[in-house]
Image: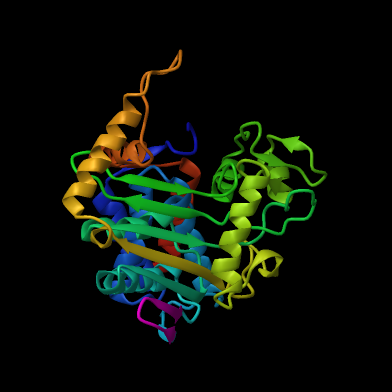
Amino acid sequence: MPGVDEGIFFPVKKLREWSEQVFRKAGVPHDDSILLADSLITANLRGVDTHGITRMLPVYINRIKNGVMNPETKLTVLRERLSTALIDCSNGPGQIGSDYAMNMAIEKASKTGTAFVATTHSNHFGAGAYWAMKALEHGMIGFAATNAPAVFAPTGGKKAMLGTNPFAVAIPAGNEMPFVLDLATTVVARGRVMLHKKQNIPLQPGWAFDESGRPTTDPVEAVKGLLAPIGGYKGYGIALAIDIMSGVMTGSNYGSHFPGFPDINMEEPSDIGGIFCAVSIDSFMDLSEFTERMDTALREIKNCPLAEGNERIYIPGEIEMGTYEKRIHEGIPLPEVVVGEFENIGEEMGVPF
C-alpha cells in the first residue's frame, strides 16, 4: 500500500542491530532486546508493518520512558496443571511473556497432546503469527490470541467496548507452505489506521466510522470514532470470545476497562492478557501422514477454478512468505515520517539511526 508499506528501503541487518541497541539503551536486558527486535523485524519482513518497528518501536520506547511499561520482565507461574498454566508478566514487554508461554505450551503438548497457556498483566505482543508459528518446527499446530483496548461497539451498540482482539493459527504442511492465518477481528487493524493518519492518507471505504457512527475514510475521524468488525455480528462474537478468554479468564483488563491505547495512554499499564495453544499432531495421526494430507488439501484449494479477473488463489500466509523472501534481500521500507521518528529516537538515546 503506497505510503504505508513503502518508503525508503533499509537493510534488514542494520535495522535489527539498531533496534536491539535502542531497546538495550531503554533498559531492556540483552536477550530480551534480541527477542523484541526479532519479533518486530519479522513482522516487517512479512509485510505486517503495523506490528513491526515501523509503528511499535516508538510506542514501546515511549511507554518505557514514561514508566508505564517495565523494561525488565519478571515471570511468575500463578497456576499450573499438566496441560495448562497462567503466567504473570509483571507489566513487561508482551513478547517476553508470550515467548515463555508459547514455549511452555509446546513442551506440555509434547507430553499431553494439547496444551493451553495464558498470560496476564502483560503488554502488546507484536504479531500473533510470530507465536503461533513457533509450533510448526515441532510438528504442532499453534494458536495465539490477545485482547486490546476497545475500538468497536457490540452489534446494536454505539459505544466502543471491544478491541481488535487478533488471533493467529499456524498449521504445518509437507512440501507446501504452512497454513498461517493471522487477523484482527476488525476489518483493519488500528495500527493501519494510525499509519494512515500519520501520513494523512485516506482510509479505504468500509474500514471505519466517525463519532456519529457514519462511515468515514478520514483517518483522523476514524481514530476518534469506531472501527468496523469483520463479518458484522460474527466478528463481534469472535472478538468477545477472545476478550473473555484473554481478559476475563486471566484476570487482565478486558472490554472498556483498558485505560487507553498503548500509543496514547502514558499514565497506566495496559494489563493485557494473551492465550497460547499447541496441538501435537501425532496425538491424532502420524505427522508424515498429516503433512501429506495437508499438501493434498492445500493443492486442491489452490487449483480451484478461478473467478473472472483473478490470476491465482493464495493460501493464508503465502503472500506474507512471498513478502518475506523479497524483503530479506531488498530491505524493509520505512515511510519518510517514520525515518524522521527514528532519527529523533536515535539522537535522544545516543544510538544514531
203 displayed left or right of 155:
left
210 displayed left or right of 6:
right
Compared to residue 158, the image places residue 256 above or below, namely below
Residue 128: where, in percent of width, then height?
Answer: 43, 56
Q: What are the residue bounds of the magenta stretch? A: 79-88
Picture quarter with the C terminus? bottom left
Residue 304, magenta (yes or no): no
Compared to residue 143, the image places residue 220 above or below, namely above
Residue 326 in which image quadrant: top left
Residue 22 in which image quadrant: bottom left
Q: Residue at x 24, y 52 (%)?
A: 13
Compared to residue 98, the image places residue 281 above or below, namely above
Residue 6: where, in percent of width, then height?
Answer: 42, 36
Q: In the orientation shown, which residue stands out farthest toward the top? A: 308
Query: Which of these two is toward me, 206 or 3?
Result: 206
Does residue 316 show up? yes
Q: Residue at x 50, y 45 (%)?
A: 337
Query: Which of these two is toward me, 149 or 107?
Result: 107
Residue 83, magenta (yes or no): yes
Tell me the chief SS of the magenta region.
Answer: strand
